[in-house]
């Protein structure tokens, strides 16, 4: 386990403060499916095969799951994709510009090129783009509750909140941004879940380590054991039943985003749509117990609400 920034990294941190964005962009779909054939809506995405779904970049899956949750047309997919590509290009430029620091003294970066790259990604996002955690969504684990409003604003839990003017998000969106940019750069990044939390894992042939992408104090590396106790205690039975602490497959990533959509819809009182979202999540990740339980709970709430609506209709 490491601290946020070691004293020896202060020079790097300060040097990056003066860096400005690079006005260049790379194609978001260079290594993906033909953009002309990609789905333009969540409804279209859900109709195609799981094999084709996994060809979509993680950012696209996330943004499509945010469609229709807010007034207006929702996230501007093309603009968000362009921003991610621009930021990835800048991260790459800054990483190469500071590579001599790693070459000169690898121990300063825990003798890990992967850690050096992730540190650069984190610092560029924080200092050049002011990406940060939404302070309104912060709460201690012992104060978290089902009705705490965490999912009341979709832009706080989906990517477009980080890519817009406010540049703020939560543990539901910050890890996705890290992974989206890192994968553009060829980094072997995975999304991983624990109870009520998501983090990033570098899973390459030479090294494997976890990255806590939701902090405001730099970059943290924690072992798996840490996430068995934070932000909540996880029993061995829960770990197995929920698939915690294992790297998610593309289908399981999509399921996570659908579950976040479902929670937003639940908080909005749009129960039929929330049922559809969790039905999709349960289908994509059938081994995850919580998706099935939430689906059953929402279906029960929906059934109980129907007699009330029928009664009101009869009175009218």
Image: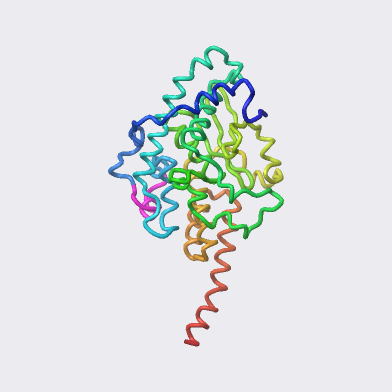
Side of 183 where 242 appears, left or right = right
Tell me: residue 313, above or below residue 120: below
Q: Measuring 66% from the left and 29% from the top, which residue is drawn there? A: 3
| Residue 164: x %, y % from top left | 43, 46
Tell me: residue 150, above or below residue 94: below
Name, please, the residue furthest toward the left: 36
The image quadrant where one finds the N terminus is top right
| Residue 204: x %, y % from top left | 52, 26
Out of 173 and 53, give the one closest to the viewer.
Answer: 173
Name, please, the residue furthest toward the bottom: 315
Side of 71 where 215 appears, left or right = right
**Residue span colored magenta:** 39-50
| Residue 241: x %, y % from top left | 63, 47
Q: Measuring 53% from the left and 16% from the top, which residue is drawn there? A: 101
Residue 86 forms part of the magenta stretch = no
| Residue 146: x %, y % from top left | 63, 58
Residue 43 forms part of the magenta stretch = yes
Total labels drawn = 0
Tell me: residue 98, above or below residue 21: above
Snapshot quadrant of residue 97: top left
Q: Measuring 49% from the left and 54% from the top, which residue is drawn there? A: 154
């Amino acid at each position: 386990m490491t601290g946020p920034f070691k004293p020896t990294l202060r020079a790097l941190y300060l040097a990056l403060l003066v860096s400005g964005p690079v006005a260049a962009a790379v194609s978001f779909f260079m290594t993906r499916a033909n953009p002309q054939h990609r789905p333009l809506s969540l409804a279209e995405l859900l109709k195609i095969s799981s094999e084709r779904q996994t060809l979509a970049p993680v950012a696209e899956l996330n943004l499509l799951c945010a469609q229709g949750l807010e007034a207006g047309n929702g996230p501007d997919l093309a603009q968000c994709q362009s921003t991610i590509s621009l930021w990835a290009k800048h991260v790459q430029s800054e990483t190469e510009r500071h590579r001599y620091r790693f070459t000169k003294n690898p121990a300063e970066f825990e003798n890990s090129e992967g850690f050096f790259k992730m540190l650069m990604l984190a610092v560029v996002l924080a200092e050049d783009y002011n990406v940060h955690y939404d302070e309104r969504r912060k709460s201690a684990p012992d104060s978290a509750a089902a009705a705490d409003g965490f999912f009341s604003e979709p832009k706080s839990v989906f990517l477009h909140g980080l890519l817009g003017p406010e540049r703020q998000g939560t543990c539901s969106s910050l890890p996705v941004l890290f992974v989206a940019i890192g994968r553009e750069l060829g980094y072997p990044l995975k999304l991983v879940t624990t109870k009520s939390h998501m983090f990033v894992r570098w899973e390459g042939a030479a090294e494997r380590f976890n990255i806590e992408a939701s902090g405001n104090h730099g970059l943290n590396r924690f072992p798996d054991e840490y996430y068995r106790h934070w932000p909540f205690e996880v029993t061995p039975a829960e770990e197995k039943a929920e698939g915690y602490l294992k790297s998610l497959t593309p289908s399981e990533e999509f399921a996570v985003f659908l579950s976040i959509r479902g929670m937003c819809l639940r908080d909005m009182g749009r129960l039929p749509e929330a049922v559809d979202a969790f039905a999709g999540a349960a289908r994509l990740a059938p081994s995850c117990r919580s998706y099935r339980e939430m689906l059953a709970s929402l279906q029960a709430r929906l059934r109980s609400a129907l007699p009330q609506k029928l009664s009101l209709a009869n009175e009218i």
